[in-house]
Image: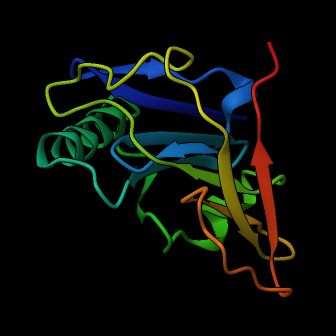
């Protein structure tokens, strides 16, 4: 069983199952995997996450480890450099989204207030990675798949 959490106000917030595999570059997450043989605790750090976000993720990982009496194996995951074990939890791949919570944990923007189409550059075969790119990008490669998300009202 995989549990996926992110931080808000220095507290863990459960990520809805439909959002498993979505990671905001400004945020840090904890992904907990439990099996019959033990626990794996991964703390994931976005490439633009603040020091308080990354520090909180590390501290909470230690707290989880202590609560489970030192049984879990801890993993540090960094955006674009995730371990194969971590990627295996997301069979549909992972998507990196720009933004997230600001330092101090105030939400950056209302998701639909100023919503604009988003363009994702996707690559990979088994573990697909999708990167949010500028929608005004004019150079495309035939080697990759690009996906545009549009909001229909």
The quarter holding residue 4 reads top right
Position in image of residue 55 (x %, y %)? 16, 45
Residue 129, relative to residue 32: is it above or below?
below
Residue 121 point in image, percent of width and height: 69, 66
Q: Residue at x 54, y 39 (%)?
A: 32
Q: Quadrant of residue 139?
A: bottom right
Q: Classify 136 as above or below 71.
A: below
**Residue at x 85%, y 72% (from the top left corner):** 126
Left or right of 76, for residue 93: right
Q: Quadrant of the N terminus?
A: top right
Which quarter of the image is occupied by the C terminus?
top right
**Left or right: 6 as drawn, with respect to 145:** left
* Residue drawn where x is 49% and y is 74% of the image: 81
Write down the quadrant of residue 87 in the picture. Answer: bottom right
Nearer the observer, 16 or 105: 105
Q: Position of residue 90 (x, y in %)?
A: 74, 51
Q: Observer-nearest residue: 36 or 93?
A: 93
What is the count of numbered marks? Answer: 0
Query: Residue 47: percent from the left, percent from the top?
Result: 34, 61
Q: Is residue 83 above or below residue 58?
A: below
Horizontally, is 68 left or right of 17 in the view?
Answer: left
Q: How is the image coloured?
A: rainbow
């Amino acid at each position: 069983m995989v549990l996926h959490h992110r931080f808000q106000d220095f507290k863990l917030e459960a990520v809805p199952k439909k959002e498993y595999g979505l990671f905001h570059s400004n945020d840090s997450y904890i992904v907990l995997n439990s099996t019959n043989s033990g626990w794996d605790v991964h703390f994931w750090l976005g490439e633009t996450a603040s020091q308080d976000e990354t520090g909180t993720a590390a501290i909470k990982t230690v707290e989880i480890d202590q609560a489970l009496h030192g049984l879990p194996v801890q993993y540090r995951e960094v955006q674009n450099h995730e371990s194969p074990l971590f990627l295996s939890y997301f069979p549909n791949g992972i998507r990196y989204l720009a933004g997230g919570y600001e330092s101090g944990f105030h939400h950056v923007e209302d998701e639909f207030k100023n919503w604009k189409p988003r363009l994702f550059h996707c690559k990979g075969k088994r573990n697909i990675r999708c990167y949010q790119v500028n929608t005004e990008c004019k150079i495309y490669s035939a080697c990759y798949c690009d996906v545009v998300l549009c909001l229909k009202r």
